[in-house]
């Protein structure tokens, strides 16, 4: 009976992870590109994404992923944006792009003064904004890889967990047999 529970638990973990859904969005200027995927592999095709601005969450747009699970949204203003995908059966995910992330990628000429970083001697220069934009574009692929890596359940993680269970069970049997 114990082995059945262990095997059932491992299978349930694999199935639950396979049905989980994730969304990832990047911004380049006013264009936001994203995709919807299943952590076990595969893109979510024809998934519906609702774009809102928190906290009122009134829908701004309804998007649909293409055959590769990708979508694009062009922002009309510098604000926080929330992208939510719901594919039914309780499979729902959200991703937020903050206004300061978006503004760092908007060309320096159209950034409102209220969003430009302050320094003791005044506003940051346009060169500083350009450097921030370049750095952001360089780290964005790393951010995407980290997001995918954190959500991927690998077979060695499952086998490692089973190994710990066997090891702990073996230790209990040893202690019980040799110390009684």
Image (spheres, rainbow, N blue to C red):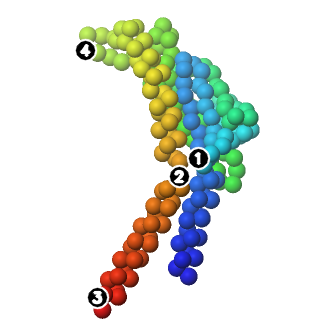
State the residue at coordinates (57%, 76%). 4
The Cα atoms of the two marked residues, 2 and 3, are separated by 38 Å
Picture disc at residue 120 = 4
Q: Position of residue 87 (x, y in %)?
A: 69, 47
Q: Is residue 56 visible?
A: no
**What residue is pinned by disc 2?**
153
* Neighbourhood count class around disc 4 (C-alpha, 10 Å): few under 14, some 14–19, many 20 upward: few
Instruction: Give the vertical position of 117 relative to 69 (above or below).
Output: above
Residue situated in front as seen by the camera: 160 or 75: 160
Residue situated in front as seen by the camera: 113 or 129: 129
**What residue is pinned by disc 3?**
179
**What residue is pinned by disc 1?**
39
Cβ atoms under marks 3 and 1 closer than 8 Å: no
The Cα atoms of the two marked residues, 3 and 1, are separated by 46 Å
Picture disc at residue 48 = none
Cβ atoms under marks 2 and 1 closer than 8 Å: yes
Q: Earlier in the sequence, mark 3 or mark 4?
A: 4
């Amino acid at each position: 009976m114990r082995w059945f529970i262990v095997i059932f638990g491992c299978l349930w973990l694999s199935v639950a992870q396979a049905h989980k859904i994730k969304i990832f969005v990047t911004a380049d200027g006013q264009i936001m590109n994203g995709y919807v995927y299943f952590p076990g592999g595969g893109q979510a095709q024809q998934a519906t994404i609702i774009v809102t601005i928190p906290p009122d969450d009134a829908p701004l747009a309804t998007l649909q992923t293409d055959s590769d699970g990708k979508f694009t949204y062009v922002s009309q203003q510098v604000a926080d944006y929330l992208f939510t995908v719901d594919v039914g059966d309780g499979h729902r995910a959200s991703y937020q792009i903050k206004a300061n992330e978006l503004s760092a990628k908007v060309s320096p000429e159209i950034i409102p003064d209220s969003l430009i970083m302050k320094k003791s001697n005044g506003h940051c220069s346009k060169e500083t904004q350009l450097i921030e934009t370049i750095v952001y574009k360089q780290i964005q692929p790393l951010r995407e890889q980290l997001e995918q890596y954190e959500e991927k359940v690998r077979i060695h993680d499952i086998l490692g967990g089973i190994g710990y269970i066997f090891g702990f069970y073996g230790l209990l049997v040893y202690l019980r047999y040799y110390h009684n």
